[in-house]
Image (cartoon, rainbow, N blue to C red):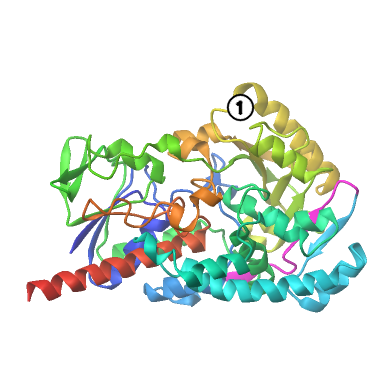
């Protein structure tokens, strides 16, 4: 069975890995010169400095490793390093709260920073453990190609028990009295571009997973995973065609037949779309049955304002991951997600891999990226705002975590949501479509996007089960399993 995949992001590469292991013939068509999508390196012109462009935090390591192992890549090929502690949160009042995976250390830190809150934390971990086990089985381990598979009595009871009707931030308030702790256990929805006060309680599984399974770093950077995947795929004969933008998906009488690119036609038994899902309709034939939905109906995730730095010094006290919060994170995020403005006092995150990986930069030097959650493309005129925001963030980073930062800068690069949109991210949102209630689980695009069109499938951050590298890879596994069953059914019918 021959499969063509449009796009070469992590969803496509993982699907190709799993399918090729099972005997499928796979060809990947990527419009850019490099594969990897959001997972890539940002480098200076000389190549001296290199840092992850997009994802940096490795969560759910067992999920990631088991999927790769299933696809034939041994765990030993991925040198994961545990971040201990997980990270530090800096509040505007000068308080710094460190998150630990170790229970005793975390309870001691809660006593130090937030006396009287550790009982709430223990309840939180116990309740979320039960929710994670049940929720993973019900919502991460199966697709919802048929909506009836979601609307079961068991799932409805589970959603009520998980308080999915509450937002992640409202759910955190059930366990923690101090608003600063409510922030600490809800800001993780920003990892997938959602507002803590808008994202349904299902996503509370993200902050829980940090404590239960740890936060990890892939030595050399997350982008190193792409070269491992490419090497394995090419060894198996998977074709990877770059600089090949697809302009049309070919559909005849309700059956997907292939794709066209630059006037050339490529025929396949099935096509998988791995671009940002709302763009699928752009390359569908006019009037394709079941594909009438418009991309305007989707709400994009937040965007990212990113500052990449090469520095001629190192900071012994800086951790690999840190969060710097304003006086009111909740108010700032309402400016961002409701008013679609850059907050007056924006929160930001720092990724400093040199703290854990000495080889992440030349000896005595370091690399750093600073990420500011901002509105998607089209909401901010970045040419007039970019320099001002850069100066503000550099000032705050120097004052609160990296003394002497400005003097140490040897290289700096900036990316805005406008850059992300030009590269194919839906409305410049860094994480696909937003993880809102109406765009989660059964309400999110599925691996079979249009049941009336046979042989057309989808995978990626905007497709169920959602964003975040391990979760996108889990979506690829769901799709590979589905296609394997389809092949078995076809084989049985032909006998």
Magenta stretch containing residue 86, yes or no?
yes
38 lies left or right of 163: left
Can residue 363 be seen in the rendering of this structure?
no
* Residue 376 against residue 489 in the figure, above or below: above
The residue positioned 43% from the left and 71% from the top of the image is: 68
> 10 Å neighbourhood of mark 1: few (<14), some, or many (≥20)?
some
19 lies left or right of 203: left
360 lies left or right of 9: right
Residue that numbered label 1 is attached to: 380
Q: Residue furthest front?
A: 153
The residue positioned 81% from the left and 58% from the top of the image is: 181
Can residue 413 be seen in the rendering of this structure?
yes
Magenta stretch containing residue 423, yes or no?
no
* Residue 422 against residue 76 in the figure, above or below: above
Place of residue 343 in the rendered image (x, y in percent of width and height, measured from the top left): 73, 34
Q: Which of these two is toward me, 165 or 344?
A: 165
Q: Which of these two is toward me, 236 or 469?
A: 469
Quadrant of image for the C terminus: bottom left
- Which region is colored magenta? 80-93
* Residue 486 against residue 37 in the figure, above or below: below
The residue positioned 34% from the left and 63% from the top of the image is: 479
26 lies left or right of 131: left
The residue positioned 37% from the left and 36% from the top of the image is: 294
Q: Which of these two is toward me, 202 or 55?
A: 202
Label 1 sits on a secondary structure element that is loop
Q: Which of these two is toward me, 296 or 361?
A: 296
């Amino acid at each position: 069975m021959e499969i063509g995949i449009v796009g070469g992001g992590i969803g496509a590469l993982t699907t190709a890995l799993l399918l090729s292991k099972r005997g499928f013939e796979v060809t990947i068509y990527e419009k850019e010169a490099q594969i990897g999508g959001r997972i890539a390196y940002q480098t200076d012109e000389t190549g001296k400095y290199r840092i992850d462009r997009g994802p940096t935090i490795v969560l759910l390591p067992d999920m990631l490793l088991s999927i790769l192992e299933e696809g034939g890549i041994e765990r030993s090929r991925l040198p994961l390093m545990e971040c201990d502690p997980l990270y530090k949160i800096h509040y505007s009042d000068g308080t710094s709260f460190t998150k630990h995976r170790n229970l005793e250390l975390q309870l001691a830190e809660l006593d130090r920073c937030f006396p009287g809150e550790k009982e709430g934390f223990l309840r939180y971990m116990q309740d979320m453990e039960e929710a994670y086990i049940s929720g993973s089985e019900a919502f991460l381990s199966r697709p919802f190609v048929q909506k009836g598979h979601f609307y079961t009595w068991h799932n409805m009871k589970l959603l009520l028990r998980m308080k999915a009707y509450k937002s992640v931030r409202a759910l955190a308030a059930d366990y923690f009295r101090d608003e600063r702790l409510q922030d600490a256990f809800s800001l993780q929805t920003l990892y997938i571009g959602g507002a803590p006060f808008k994202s349904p309680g299902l996503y509370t599984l993200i902050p829980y997973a940090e404590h239960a399974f740890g936060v990890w770093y892939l030595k050399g950077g997350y982008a190193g995973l792409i070269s491992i995947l490419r090497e394995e795929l090419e060894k198996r004969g998977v074709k990877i065609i770059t600089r090949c933008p697809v302009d049309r998906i070919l559909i005849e009488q309700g059956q997907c037949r292939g794709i066209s690119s630059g006037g050339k036609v490529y025929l396949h038994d099935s096509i998988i779309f791995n671009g940002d899902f709302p763009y699928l309709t752009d390359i569908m034939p006019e009037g394709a049955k079941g594909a009438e939905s418009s991309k305007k109906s989707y709400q994009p995730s937040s965007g990212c304002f990113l500052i990449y730095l090469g520095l001629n010094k190192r900071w012994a006290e800086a951790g690999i991951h840190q969060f710097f919060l304003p006086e009111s994170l909740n108010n700032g995020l309402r400016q961002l997600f409701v008013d679609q403005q850059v907050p007056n006092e924006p929160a930001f995150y720092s990724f400093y891999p040199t703290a854990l990986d000495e080889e992440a930069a030349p000896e005595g030097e370091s690399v750093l990226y600073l990420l500011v959650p901002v509105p998607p493309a089209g909401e901010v005129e970045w040419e007039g705002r970019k320099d001002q925001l850069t100066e503000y963030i550099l000032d705050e980073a120097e004052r609160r975590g990296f003394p002497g930062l400005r003097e140490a800068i040897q290289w700096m690069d900036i990316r805005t949501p406008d850059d992300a949109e030009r590269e194919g991210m839906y409305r410049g949102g860094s994480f696909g479509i937003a993880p809102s209630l109406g765009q989660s689980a059964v309400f999110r695009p599925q691996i079979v996007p249009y049941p009336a069109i046979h042989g057309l499938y989808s995978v990626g951050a905007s497709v169920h089960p959602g964003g975040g590298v391990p979760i996108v890879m889990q979506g690829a596994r769901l799709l590979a399993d589905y296609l394997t069953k389809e092949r078995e059914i076809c084989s049985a019918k032909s006998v």
